[in-house]
Image (spheres, rainbow, N blue to C red):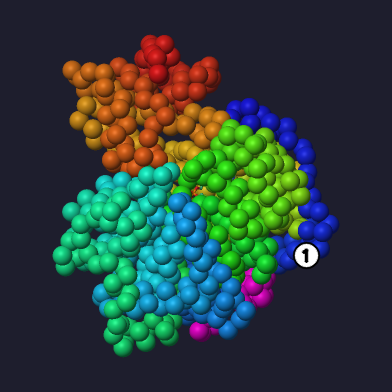
Amino acid sequence: MSDSIESRLKEERRFPPSAEFSKGARVQSHAAYTSMYELSLSDPETFWREETGDLVFRTPWKKVSEWALPHAKFFVGATLNITESCLDRHLGTSARTRAAIVWEGEPGDVRTLTYFELHREVVRLSAALTDLGVKPGDRVAIYMGMVPETAVAMLACARIGATHSVIFGGFSSDALRERINDCGAKVLLTQDGAWRRGNVVPLKKMADEALEKTPSIEKAVVLRRIGQEKCPVEMKQGRDVWWDELVTRTPSENALGLAKKPAAFDAEHPLFILYTSGSTGKPKGVLHTTAGYLVGAHVTTKYVFDLRESDLYWCTADVGWVTGHSYIVYGPLSCGASCMMYEGAPNAPDWGRFWNIIEKHGVTILYTAPTAIRAFIRAGDQWPAKADLSSLRLLGSVGEPINPEAWTWYHRVVGGGRCPIVDTWWQTETGSIMLTTLPGACYSKPGSTGLPLFGVDIEVVKDRGDPCKANEGGKLVIQRPWPSMARTLYNDDARFKDAYWSQMPGVYFTGDGARRDEDGYFWVVGRIDDVLNVAGHRIGTAEIESALVSHPAVAEAAAVGRPDDLKGQALVVFVTLKQGQDPKDLKSKLAEHIDKEIGKFARPDAIRFTDSLPKTRSGKIMRRLLKEVASGAETKGDTSTLEDLSVLAKLRTDEE
Ligand code: PRX
């Protein structure tokens, strides 16, 4: 990865879209992009009036925004039901019978839901949820895999004004419980199990463990995905109800009425809470509200993916992360797009799976992550070569910096040299894409995430907030609120202020380091806070550390990232054990402990035992030094504050 940073610094190639691509695009030139961008900042009222025209508001907005930082409101005065923009508005158009979701299960089963069918499923589930007692403002947890019902669940909650919190299916029962209790969810929607690399992930069983100590949960709704034979589940009397039985019950008149003609909610009505990692052990419940989030997701999907009626668009993210929320569910559906959705792993049954899906269904737009691209490179060109990928016309990348080697491979091997690549930078907190290159308008540079999108006033600054010069590294900040900005952290507004708005007065600090080149293109280096990005998963070092020290054998722990060719960053932990503990066998025990506390995806890549950790005289762990040790780099910089230099020497000679 250090190689790739080097190669990114040297990268000078430019890839303009073909004349043919530009001719058919919504924004066809750099000048057109610039004038739209400038208008979005100089006259947001006019810009957003135009851009919100195809969304459904019951009461039109009166004022584009109002803010008293760190709080902001957008589309003030509007009322809406977000699902009318995503579903109902398409029923009177040709989209009615168009596929909304083309789904392929890991075993190869295929299902298609038209907009009409998706709407119907959502209406039925929202009526059922109302009859279960769910009311506007109640929280509903969703712990599911990649099945169409997960989208149905999110939309059904939104339709009745309940705030959903999707918890990624890779999280353990402990992590699920912690999130359910933090948001006080009343109902949990889950499924018996999910297919993953030929195995069944027993979601309901894990949910049962979580629900042992979740006083707020009244009901659990269980979708049958796998079936009793391969995935037996126990249904708890009075609490658990099968999804199919629930939605086929005759709903009450009131619930059906509300589901068919849903209530309109205020623009700032809470839409969802999504937990993500920060620099302390406790996950952050990022809260997004309705109108601003919808507008952000809608407008970015429309322009960045430049969707047409003939497209089959595929975002390979999991719906449990923000990319799935904005670019599998709300953004594409609000555009009336046809979306591919795939349940399983990219290498099930082999590394040809993605390419088969593209060929079989005729996918035209692929949006995936650099870590997946690097895994495909490693698996070999023979896999994509076997499939006909000529349906593809646009490629996207998200989640971490893409190294130019991976970019070039993606462009050449997957895109056949003809598809523009949009590298999109954004975060759970930003709600929608902030930086990219509009595909018909702007050339891309491999490894650069491009230019700001509409309404995004973004800059690279020094510690005090002064702008950096061209190519000078600094902190990436956003200098005014934008529509899809997170409104707060659920139940922790003080942390919202502190984590994002306290570094520099009046600006949002992203946690990322970046530089901006002489053409105005941004190059994001990665997190500069205590957050790691391991294979596209955002992992807080403090979360890992607090999970480790909760193990009875552990005295102290420090987690750091090490550059990794495949994952971007690998997770290395340094552990000191309590007196009398034997490190023998503890490596696997600690790995299992992380599986239990957080989930398998957060397993450390290396666990190193040590007698002590390098600390300053005031007792702070010197992570910078540990990072260098973990990556095998020479110690640079200052070690004068290190309390005991021999600790460092010993760490270096310790084996992994
Ligand atoms: O460090 C940046 C990195 O991912 C972080 C956000 O993670 P999360 O909230 O999980 O959202 C991921 C999907 C939007 C950012 O702070 N990141 C995301 N996209 C890129 C990126 N880094 C470089 N280039 C990107 N395109």
Residue 48 lies in the magenta stretch? yes
Q: Position of residue 59 (x, y in %)?
A: 51, 84
- From the viewer's perspective, tell me whether residue 45 is left or right of residue 205: right
Circle 1 residue: 24
Residue 294, relative to residue 250: is it above or below? Answer: above
Packing grade of label 1 (10 A; few <14, some 14-19, many >=20) is few
Three-letter code for the amino acid on which mark 1 is drawn: Gly
Splitting the image into 4 quarters, where does residue 167 fall?
bottom left
Residue drawn at x 55%, y 59% is 340
Residue 469 visible, this orientation: no
At numbered mark 1, what does the secondary structure look like: helix, strand or loop?
helix
- From the viewer's perspective, tell me whether residue 21 is left or right of residue 554: right
Quadrant into which the N terminus falls: top right
194 or 317: which is nearer to us? 194
Start and end of the magenta stretch? 41-60
Residue drawn at x 24%, y 35% is 550
Q: Position of residue 319 (x, y in %)?
A: 46, 56
